[in-house]
Amino acid sequence: FVTESRRLHPQCCFEWLDFFDEPERLDALWAEVSSKGQLKIFVDIGGDRAAADVCRVLAALGEAVSRGATAPTLVVVKSRELAAAAEAVPCSADGVIAEPLSWWARVAQPP
């Protein structure tokens, strides 16, 4: 997927990275990409992973920012389980979750 994405969109940076095993590489890559313009992150952890796993990835991104990385202008997460959890709670007419803090706390719990 990464190789094909690089071929189709050479102006963008596509990387495969294990956030948990390679935090130093995450920091270095983050700094390199941020220096070239606005950082946008697309997260796909693969398969039907539990929402708690997705939340661990988002926490790793937050930790990178707390270590001094520039905050991304956009983070997109591909997760069926996270989407299903969002569909199961009350939202406003424009799709905003009514109680996001309690929702995040629930979906971040391991199954």
Image: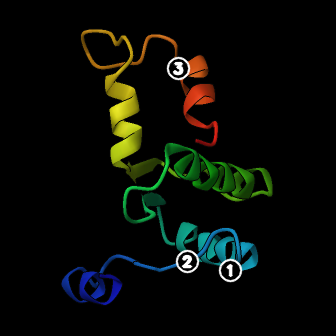
Residue at image point 55% right, 77% down: 17
Measured as percent of width and height from the top left, residue 86 is found at 38, 28
Closer to the N terminus: mark 2 or mark 1? 2
Question: What is the spatial separation of the Cα atoms under label 3 and label 2, in whole angstroms?
Answer: 28 Å
Which residue does the numbered mark 1 point to in the structure image?
25
Residue at image point 43% right, 48% down: 74
Measured as percent of width and height from the top left, residue 14 is found at 40, 78
Q: Which mark is residue 12?
A: none
Q: Which mark is residue 17?
A: 2
**Mark 2 or 1, closer to the camera:** 2
Q: In the picture provided, is 24 more to the left or to the right than 104?
A: right
Disc 2: CA contacts within 10 A as few (<14), some (14-19) or many (>=20): few
Which residue does the numbered mark 3 point to in the structure image?
100
Q: Amino acid at mark 1?
A: Arg
* Residue that lies at the very extreme toward the right in this rendered image: 67
Question: What is the spatial separation of the Cα atoms under label 1 and label 3, in whole angstroms?
Answer: 31 Å
